[in-house]
């Protein structure tokens, strides 16, 4: 009995040390995960919306405004379109803690970059140089602003939907 108690105490101490090392632990593992899973699963609809946004760009205004302007317009419309989608997602499934917003944003960023490079290179057969070109802010390529938006949006909507009413 005493040996089990010692082992249990040792495990508790290890858990406490882990919590100190990994501050996300407490919020991530000890609170309701149902909504966080839903937020992450929603990401799998994002590529369809992004592809539709790109298809509209290619089919309509790219020839009128040129490649760079079309890229910039498409990035802005993507940010706005995803903002509307995020509003409905986070209104239905609120983020309960800032830590959750941070985790969802990082996961969405990781999945987006993975999809962009994986799909863009291996399916669309774009060279790496072309894919990396969209990250060049010095040349007016503003795709990275979309990545910033997809990363901070969960926290922005966490703040919007969790405001204290006065």
Image (tube, rainbow, N blue to C red):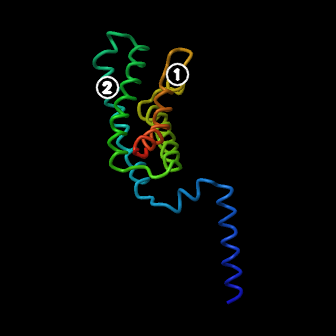
Mark 2 Cα shell of 10 Å, populated few (<14), some (14-19), many (≥20): few
Q: Which residue is mark 2?
A: 55
Q: Is residue 106 left or right of residue 74?
A: right
Identity of the residue drawn at 59% across and 53% down: 24
From the viewer's perspective, is residue 138 above or below residue 40? above
Residue 55 rendering spot, x and y as whole percentages: 31, 26
Closer to the camera in the image, 84 or 67? 84
- Where 46 falls versus 38 (above or below)? above
Residue at the (50%, 23%) spot, across then down: 134
Q: Quadrant of the C terminus?
A: top left
Tell me the CA gap for discs 1 and 2: 19 Å
Q: Where does label 1 land, which residue? A: 133
Q: Residue 74: x, y in percent? A: 38, 22
Question: Residue 152, percent across and down?
Answer: 49, 37
Q: Circle 2 — which element? A: helix
Question: Which image quarter: residue 43?
Answer: top left
User: Upstream in the sequence, badge 1 or badge 2?
Assistant: 2
Quarter of the image that includes the N terminus: bottom right
> Disc 1 on helix, strand or loop?
helix
Q: Tell me where residue 23 appears, x and y as whole percent.
A: 62, 54
Question: For the point 53% across and 56% down, which residue is it?
Answer: 28
Q: Residue furthest bottom?
A: 1
**Residue at position x 42%, y 35% from top?**
123
Relative depth, front residue between 106 and 116: 106
Asked if the residue at tag 2 contacts the one at tag 1, i.e. Cβ–Cβ closer than 8 Å, the answer is no
Q: Residues within 10 Å of mark 1 (few under 14, many from 20)?
A: few
Give the image quarter of residue 72.
top left
Horizontal side, residue 81 vs residue 133: left or right: left
Q: List the single residue furthest toward the front.
A: 166
Say the numbered circle drawn on residue 122. Answer: none
Q: How many marks?
A: 2
């Amino acid at each position: 009995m005493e040996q089990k108690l010692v082992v249990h105490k040792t495990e508790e101490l290890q858990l406490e040390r882990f919590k100190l090392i990994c501050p996300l632990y407490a919020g991530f593992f000890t609170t309701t995960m149902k909504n966080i899973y839903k937020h992450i699963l929603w990401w799998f609809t994002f590529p369809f919306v992004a592809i539709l946004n790109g298809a509209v760009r290619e089919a309509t205004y790219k020839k009128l405004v040129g490649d760079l302007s079309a890229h910039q317009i498409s990035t802005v419309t993507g940010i706005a379109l995803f903002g509307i989608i995020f509003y409905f997602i986070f209104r239905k499934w609120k983020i309960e803690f800032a830590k959750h917003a941070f985790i969802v944003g990082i996961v969405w960023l990781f999945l987006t970059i993975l999809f962009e490079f994986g799909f863009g290179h291996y399916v669309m057969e774009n060279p790496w140089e072309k894919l990396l070109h969209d990250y060049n802010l010095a040349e007016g390529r503003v795709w990275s602003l979309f990545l910033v938006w997809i990363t901070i949006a969960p926290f922005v909507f966490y703040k919007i939907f969790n405001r204290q009413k006065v």
